[in-house]
Amino acid sequence: MVNQPGLAVRAALDGVGLTHALEPYVRGMLADGRLVSVLDAWLPPFDGFYLYYPSRFQVPPKLRVFIDFLRERQRRAG
């Protein structure tokens, strides 16, 4: 059991066990066969991240910039 995604993936690559990782992080390793996806039938679809914050009113400027950045990135991703 580890608390770093990179370490968990490294362990899976070394054949030590299974890991749960976001697909974009391991896409190349899945494509070239270094990792194999298992339990796909039980994997729920990933609709994306959600951002929760206290109110849509009086959003701090730094948070507004971050929200706009995420929306633009999501728009470009399709």
Image: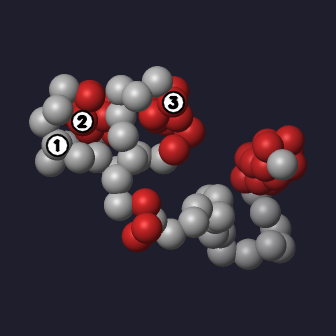
Task: Residue 56: give x, y in percent of width and height.
Answer: 80, 73
Q: Report whether residue 49 is seen.
A: yes
Q: Mark 3 or mark 1, which is nearer to you?
A: 3
Task: Residue 45: give x, y in percent of width and height.
Answer: 57, 66
Q: Which residue is mark 3?
A: 31
Q: Who's the residue at 26% across and 28% down the image?
A: 13
The answer to which image quadrant residue 10 occupies is: top left
Relative side of 71 to 22, left or right: right
Q: Who's the residue at 56% across and 39% down the image?
A: 24
- Going by the numbered disc 1, the residue's amino acid type is Gly
Which badge, 3 or 2, comes first in the chain's sequence? 2
Which badge, 3 or 1, comes first in the chain's sequence? 1
Above or below residue 27? Residue 71 is below
Q: Between 72 and 66, which is closer to the camera in this rendering?
A: 72
The total of numbered circles placed on residues is 3
Q: Between 34 and 22, which is closer to the camera in this rendering?
A: 34
Element assignment for label 3: helix
- Going by the numbered disc 3, the residue's amino acid type is Ala
Above or below residue 7? Residue 42 is below
Q: Between 72 and 18, which is closer to the camera in this rendering?
A: 18
Relative side of 2 to 35, left or right: left
Q: Mark 3 or mark 2, which is nearer to you?
A: 3
- Going by the numbered disc 2, the residue's amino acid type is Ala
Residues under numbered marks 2 and 1 in contact, where contact means CB atoms less than 8 Å apart? yes
Relative side of 29 to 56, left or right: left
Element assignment for label 1: loop
For marks 2 and 1, give the CA distance: 5 Å
For marks 3 and 1, give the CA distance: 19 Å
Q: Which residue is mark 1?
A: 17
- Residue 12: give its label: 2
Task: Residue 54: give x, y in percent of width and height.
Answer: 66, 74
The answer to which image quadrant residue 5 occupies is: top left
